[in-house]
Amino acid sequence: MSGLEVLAYPARGAAPRTPVLFVHGAYVGAWCWEEHFLPWFAARGFPAYAVSLRGHGRSAGRENLHRYGLADYAEDVAHAAERLERPAVLVGHSMGALVVQKYLERGGAAAAAVLVCPVPGYGLMPATLALAWMRPMLFMGIQRLAAGMDAPLEVLSEAMFAGEIEPERLARHGRRMQRESRRALLDMAGFGLPQPWLARRPATLVLGAARDALIPPLHAQAAAALSGAEYRLLDDLGHAVMLDRGWERAAEAIAGWIDARGL
């Protein structure tokens, strides 16, 4: 698809390492990686990129958002990946983890994959039902966001972060959030999930967040088991690991795992 927003941070240093391509989750865009992760990885020698999937961020297609599903988003990852100098380490967060797996399912090349707080291969339904039962007010606030209405900042804070976050930062992130495709939400519920037995299987790391209200660690660990991946748990982080306080722990876990593979 033309008109995709791809943020690019050139690597610092004489010998650039394996590029890293970040894929965002639902309701956000590539901007979620830019505050911390893109400059952090570039400073450590990784050419760092983040793509806004069609209809998100500054990418084209906002007017047709509800037509797009996970397979369409996988095409966007393919388009962004093909523009890079060599196969990248793909880092997908939440919905983006399914998009990365869809990209691999269609034969896309990757040096490795990191799935962060991933929607598991059996879909969102079990985690959603548990949230509705255990935390009904949070569940209702998220449904408001899914319907295109403003959700209270308290809901955003509880859903995305492990603890207190500065009100101005929370409001700034809230202003940049957007609707998600109804078709993509249906895909995540079970109608368009990746089929892991069809996918290439590069070395894969799954990261769960101990204080994730949306994809609790039990589901992240199940995602690792289903994809045959290594699993690690990040303490004291919420769902939005790239924006939460202590985001460095998530960045260091990813970079250290890449280092261990000589990429």
Image (cartoon, rainbow, N blue to C red):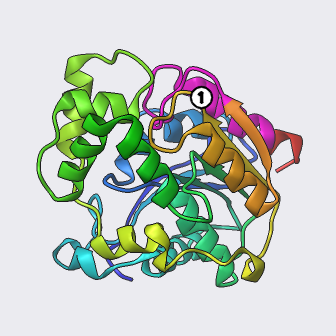
- Is residue 67 rendered to the left or right of residue 163? left
**Residue 238 included in the magenta stretch of the image:** yes
Quadrant in the rendering for residue 228? bottom right
In which quadrant of the rendered image does the N terminus lie? bottom left
Q: Residue beneath label 1, please?
A: 210
Residue under the image location 47 percent in, 32 percent down? 36
Name the residue type under label 1: Ala
Nearer the observer, 77 or 178 = 178
Residue under the image location 45 percent in, 42 percent down? 214
Residue under the image location 58 percent in, 25 percent down? 248
Quadrant in the rendering for residue 85? bottom right
Nearer the observer, 87 or 67 = 67
Nearer the observer, 2 or 94 = 94
- Is residue 148 rendered to the left or right of residue 33? left
In the image, which residues are magenta? 234-257
Quadrant in the rendering for residue 60? bottom left
- Is residue 123 rendered to the left or right of residue 179? right
Residue 132 point in image, percent of width and height: 35, 45
Q: Is residue 222 above or below residue 159?
A: below
**Residue 129 included in the magenta stretch of the image:** no
Res 199 visible: yes
Residue 46 point in image, percent of width and height: 66, 45
- Helix, strand or loop at label 1? It is loop
Residue 243 point in image, percent of width and height: 43, 32
Residue 76 point in image, percent of width and height: 46, 75
How crowded pointer 1 is (Cα within 10 Å; few <14, some 14-19, many 20+) is rated as many
